[in-house]
Amino acid sequence: MIPSAFEYHRPPSVAEAIRIVSERGDDARVIAGGHSLIPMMKLRMAHLEHLVDLQDVAELKELSIADGIVRIGAMVTQHELITHEGLAQGVPIVREAALLIADPQVRYMGTIGGNLANGDPGNDMPGLMQCLDARFALEGPEGNREVAARDFYGAAYMTDRADEEILTRITFAAPTGGYAYEKQKRKIGDYATAAAAVLINAQDGRVIRASVAMTNLSDVPVWSEAAADALIGTACDAAACDAAVAAMSAEIDPQEDSRGPIEFKRHVAGTILRRAIARAWARA
């Protein structure tokens, strides 16, 4: 189908984008890569009078790693996350996750900001950013503020971002130690049946620090502190993995859909988490 008529805006700055959105109110929507919004508009499930494209906002395309801190502009594409040498060396888990998102055609246009701000529980980056303990910079007519990724998601498609705010930047400390992003999906391009992001730091053959997050197993990404705690002090043996899986399973809430019934999803979630723990431990 063809979307209904709308007025197209391409502002050169965040300030100008915020001005347009503030003036147009509910009739305006910001667009990043467009892979979520445009299909909805084509299906006439979303009707907008004004579309505000962020493609010309250069400040949103910056990506830097300095003094152990990673800063990623919201308009950095998944393809750029994959091909950026500094990011691949400093935070390889981001590249690993981005390679599992959709397909190359989507990754050339899809942005990290759009993936995060949409609030879709099937998106890969929200859970990963919770695992990394990232912070999101938001700008709006009332000024700037930061929100922790672990506090950003309230329900499916509902986030802490106000309607007139724009997610502009993602910041986190570059992790050390072992890492893994595991994802099971029915076919290339599909959302995950279940996915797991795991970070592990080890010392003297034991886990001293860990972080675990799951994707598409609830209406929000699930950062499982209990699963991470189950690994600390262990050598990631079978008993520790069992404890981590049990802790994670108590926090997820999968729903039956075309990807399978609830019990199948719980089984897949456990399998994926075990694989992620094993790979992160081997790399630690």
Image (spheres, rainbow, N blue to C red):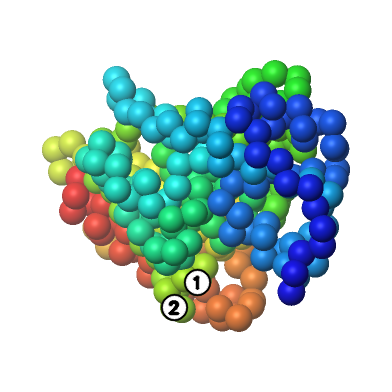
Q: Is residue 132 left or right of residue 251?
A: left
Find residue 126 and name its label. Answer: none
User: Quick one: label 2, few (<14), some, or many (20+) residues within 10 Å?
Assistant: few
Measuring from the top left, give residue 186's x and y in whole percent: 46, 78
Q: Residue at x 38, y 70 (%)?
A: 271
How far separated are the C-alphas under marks 1 and 2?
Answer: 6 Å
Residue 7 drawn above or below residue 260: above
User: Quick one: label 1, few (<14), some, or many (20+) residues within 10 Å?
Assistant: some
Asked whether 254 or 173 is in front, the reply is 173
Q: Secondary structure at mark 2?
A: loop
Residue 172 found in image quarter:
top left
Image quarter of the C terminus? top left
Q: Residue at x 31, y 23 (%)?
A: 66
Q: Hey, what amino acid is under mark 1?
A: Asp
Measuring from the top left, give residue 224's x and y in whole percent: 49, 48
Asked whether 177 or 27 is in front, the reply is 27
Q: Residue at x 30, y 42 (%)?
A: 84
Residue 248 visible, this angle: no
Asked whether the residues under the numbered discs 1 and 2 touch, taking CB atoms below 8 Å apart as contact, a structural biologist would say yes
Location of mark 2 (residue): 187
Location of mark 1 (residue): 190
Measuring from the top left, give residue 139's x and y in whole percent: 65, 26
Q: Is residue 203 left or right of residue 221?
A: left
Residue 13 found in image quarter:
top right
Q: Residue at x 61, y 35 (%)?
A: 167
Most distant residue in the left direction: 204
Residue 259 found in image quarter:
bottom right
Residue 15 drawn above or below residue 168: above
Measuring from the top left, give residue 282's x and y in whole percent: 18, 53
Q: Hey, what amino acid is under mark 2?
A: Lys
